[in-house]
Amino acid sequence: MTPEVWQPGDIVLDLYEVLDVVHSGGMGLVHRVRHQGWNVDLAVKTPRPELVASPEGRSRFEAEAGTWVGLGLHPHTVNCAYVRTIDGRPRVFAEWVDGGSLAEAVAGGRLYEGGPHTAAGRVLDIAVQTAWGLQHAHDSGLVHQDVKPANVMLEPDGTAKVTDFGLAGARPADPAAATDTGVTFGGMTPAYCSPEQALAAAGREVRLTPATDVWSWALTVLEMFTGRRPTRHGQAAPEALEALLEEGPADPRVPAVPPAVAGLLRQCFMPNAEARPAELDEAARVLAEVYGDVTGTPFPRRAPRGVGLLADGLSNQALSLLDLGRTEAAEDLWRQAADVDPHHLAARYNYGLHLWRSGRRTDLEVLSDIEGGRVFGGAPQLADRLRGFIHLEQDDRKRATESLHRATRQEGGPSEEHAEHEGPVPADTAEALAVLAERPPPTTARLTGHGAYVTAVAVTADGGLVLSGDRDGGVCVWDVETGRCLHELTATGAEIVATAVDAAGRTGLVLRKQAPLEAWDLTHGTPIPLPPELDADDSSTDAPTAVALSGDGSMGATGHADGTLRFWDVRTGALLQRVAAHSAPVAAVTMTADGAFALSTPADSRNDQRVCAWNVTDGRRHAALTPPLDEQGYGAWGVHVNWCALSADSRYALQVWDSGNMVLWDARRDRVVARSPHSLRVIHHAIALAPGGSPALVGSSQPLRVLEPATGRCLRTYDNGPEDEDGHQGVYGDADTRDTNTVAISADGRFAVAGSRKVISVLPLPAPGYRAPWLYARPKGADELSDGTRAFDTAMEQALHLFDEGRYEESAARLRAAEAVPGFGRHPDLREAWAAVGRHGLRSGLRSGYQLFDLDGHRHFTQPPVLAVSRDGDFFVTGRWTGEIDLWNAASGRLDRELDWPLPVARTLTLVCGDQATVIHGRNGQVALLDLVDDRAWDLTGPDDAGTVETLVYAPAADRLLTGDDTGKLCSWDLGFDGERRTLRTSWQALRAHRGPVAAVALSSDGRYAASREDTHAGLDLASAVRGDEVCGWELESGERLWTRSGVPPQTALEITPDGGTLLEYGPFGVTAVRTLTGKRLYGVADTSNARLLAIAPVGGRAVVATAGALIAFDLATGRVQRKIPTEHLTTALALTADGRFAVLGTHTQRIDVVDLDTGELLRTLTGHRSTVHALALSEDGRTLMSGDYDATVRGWELDWEFTWEPGDVAQPPEKRRRPRMPWRTR
């Protein structure tokens, strides 16, 4: 409980101990609090209620507070740690400075202790420091506007820090609100204001520049030499200075103004703002020289510089801006934090939590981010805490309990980087454990016994009984508490289409495909006779397609293939109403508890997209959801409705539009109550809506998900859980909730029922209430960060020097030293340098791997997406379903250019001509070349009688492209550009290779030799197909056929080894090697049947093949299997590092595995994809990885490798070395 007025001794949010009320003034209150988690004191500035009572006032305060948040760190400015709203009021949490204000030091005489000579040095020291602090603000584009002694804080060691940046503009503009001239109003304090500020206060439009701070700073310096406030009105500063110089200070302890200082102050008090010193750094230099003259010793301080925030500070800053409503700026800061440290747990957690709550990330993706931070970022205790918070917001009570308890009992010293998050049980963890203690264990059940796929489920109002049907006609009644089948109503019959049950579980309805409706007494398991008019002929056009039962069991409804609805009395069998509802078959119908009201929706949304509400008593339509049209006459909500769910209480309908919105409709009020974007694809085929319109339950080939219709947010994924004591997969497991065919939600909104394969899962729906806390990192001081930056820069400079000398192992040692500096362990400069040094070593392991970005291309990319990455990893290209090609920055995922030539929709993309162009193989068989430099395109058609290109291959070293078409022709192209105007230089040669279509081609790296396979299954006669396919070898310059091999199995793919000497044939019958020049068989590779994918390393003489159950690495020279690695998940994409040691595998289970082929060890699993990984593209140095999935999502990854260097490496000549891009050198 937060007290309304904070008093010393109060504990706020179980986190902040109030130590003192240190100030009460024009702005409001300043409290000194101790952050109990960090054991650090903070100053909390709380605005007076009237300042933020109006929207304008709150907006003004938040904008000004955001200015201070964004200032960055400097040794002579007070750091704003973050802004946090508590009890509806935004509060600024700033660094606590323990020595009080300069105003207090002047008024209390502390500034003048030790006599005038000592005091003179102290005054000059403070003046220099404040000038440096203000200059930092000015360099950041910020004008303070309220510089005065009260806004200068002093550390006990004499360090001065300027505070309250930006807050001047948040204060009252009415001068009457100020009690005296020392109190701020209207963005200034009258006693310290500049002439231009006075004009602004009088209503004149005046632009305030840094010169206004120069005037106020000079008044602050003048006050130190006066011993009191020099004047009541800041504009009178010149007169006050002259009076002081003439009369001297009244207090004998106060030093006299040195002549050089007097001259500087006169310049600062020039009425013309442009005549004042342009830079306070210059003023500081003058005062530092005066210090030496006055004290006889050099000025003791070095001019500091502002230091950039690291990931923890950037994340705190992002949280502040998010609290202030500046969402885009906050997200940009989190992206910067991810660049500075991709594995920083606090930043990953906060950003992931924000994206999850805004519906742009799933719960599993956030958990995956935390796991990645744990694996490579350390701090397991913190990772468990954060996982526990996410699990609790999911309402996954079991996992939340496990994670939080594990976090509280872990021992061992945390890493220095995360020490502030470790230690005793934090308040937020204790709060989460208390919430868990109040929530009972969830009720779950796993109902097994169906002999075929479950196709229909219905559940009673309290979730206690389930009525289910399967594909073979089996119908069962289940008791959820015991998991027992109470009655098997039927074992076989026509497939069950739908089931319905009343609230108490006494009566059930069963609908089979093309069969009469059935009614059952569920208590006794016996059939209930139905009247003849409900017994439609199973072959008629009005066969029932949907069924519903009122909660009290008195009324029934059926939807029919002819679009009609029938309402009838279950007790008497009397048909009450028959209405023409839709122009398409009825897909679903629901009824209220009393049977007075019903909802219906059609199956064919292209012809009828309405949802209708019905008064059952008179059969009249109460309301209809009719989608609006846009200005062009198309649906304003999307292309068409993919799915529609009706709530069990018959009040709400949820339409999910393809390439559009999720629309929630309140049928009683006939009003659309929510529209939100969604990421659901056509693979989702089961959806249910809870009473009250939220949440929605979505089943598909992926794990079951719970969505919030108002936002599209995924509240919970019932993902793969731990096995129970008997070794069965838990009810949250993929085995139960993948391939969901049918779903239902109980009328009390507490339980979800999902039928997937032969299993029925009863799951608790997430209970609302708990929200995971944000994680604020302990702010680091400017001095601490400055020292770290200096140590990091020194080590990096040394590493660069050693790199330039070719001493790579020593350079790597200095980079490890830079890596050890707290906060800099995964800095982008360090990663860039490490990759550069690593190019001269041997790749020996994987240090880390992390996602850089993800691009949702559902309405953009081809499906599945096609992509290619440049050899240097700087950019990648993708194709759109409309034919355009996009060029992206591979580090940021930013779209650099859209190349909108009228090109074919890409089947494949191949970068050519030194990555200056891309060859597009269109789905229509057309081939085109697109210049990525000047956006011109050329058609690569070949001869006039050329057919549709079926396959192509490119040899980069020779810039040669080889295509094969459906008429049996091969066409080789020599590519290149000439001149400044970049004219495409091409020459091509065509030859008739086969009678039938060319299905596969291979090309040697020098472009001289090729191989091709004819697809005889599409050939001229059956005998050719029986004999198998034909493979031929070619010498391309002459067009000579070198050899022919017949009987090659269909679907065989071809690859020529880097040395050009061996052709590999791989496919369903394994891998076979033949000589490229003769076609003579060399060897077969053992255990490679059903070879799906093959990759060859450019060096090292190794290839790897993916079969249905293993990854097999073999020697290209002999075919000897070097390593056979069993794979649990089906490999759907494959890439190989250039040295052949490491393989990257995409799988049908949405994961990407990195495997060491020398040891067989799984090094890292990258998660985040939502469907089967379809494509992988790896840069030449193995650092940049792009992946695409069948959900039209492209993700960018960075792989950070470990390297070794041979002792006594011989340095390459400087012109041969690829020097790292090291931006820290220009910081």
Image: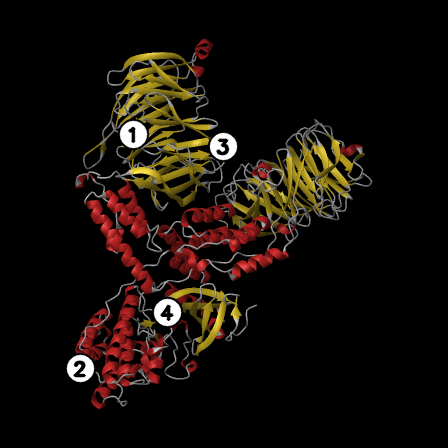
Give percent across and percent down for residue 403: 53, 51
Disc 2 or disc 4, which is closer to the eye? 2
Of the 4 image quadrants, the one containing the N terminus is: bottom right
Disc 3 or disc 4, which is closer to the eye? 3
Residue 1099 image label: 1
Query: Which SS class for mark 1?
Result: loop
| Residue with the mark numbered 4 | 166
Q: CA distance from mark 2 to mark 4?
A: 34 Å
The three-letter amino acid code for the residue at tag 3 is Glu
Q: Mark 2 or mark 1: which comes first in sequence?
A: 2
Front-lying residue, 1148 or 104? 104
Q: Quadrant of residue 224?
A: bottom left
The three-letter amino acid code for the residue at tag 4 is Gly
Instruction: Say few, some or many: other residues with alpha carbon within 10 Å of mark 1 (under 14 / 14 to 19 / 20 or more).
Output: some
| Residue with the mark numbered 3 | 1128
Disc 4 or disc 1, which is closer to the eye? 1
The three-letter amino acid code for the residue at tag 2 is Pro
Are the residues tagged 2 and 3 within 8 Å (C-beta)? no
Q: CA distance from mark 3 to mark 4?
A: 58 Å
Which residue shows up at 24% across the image and 43% down it? 808
Residue 259 image label: 2
Q: Mark 2 or mark 3: which comes first in sequence?
A: 2
Q: Mark 2 or mark 4: which comes first in sequence?
A: 4
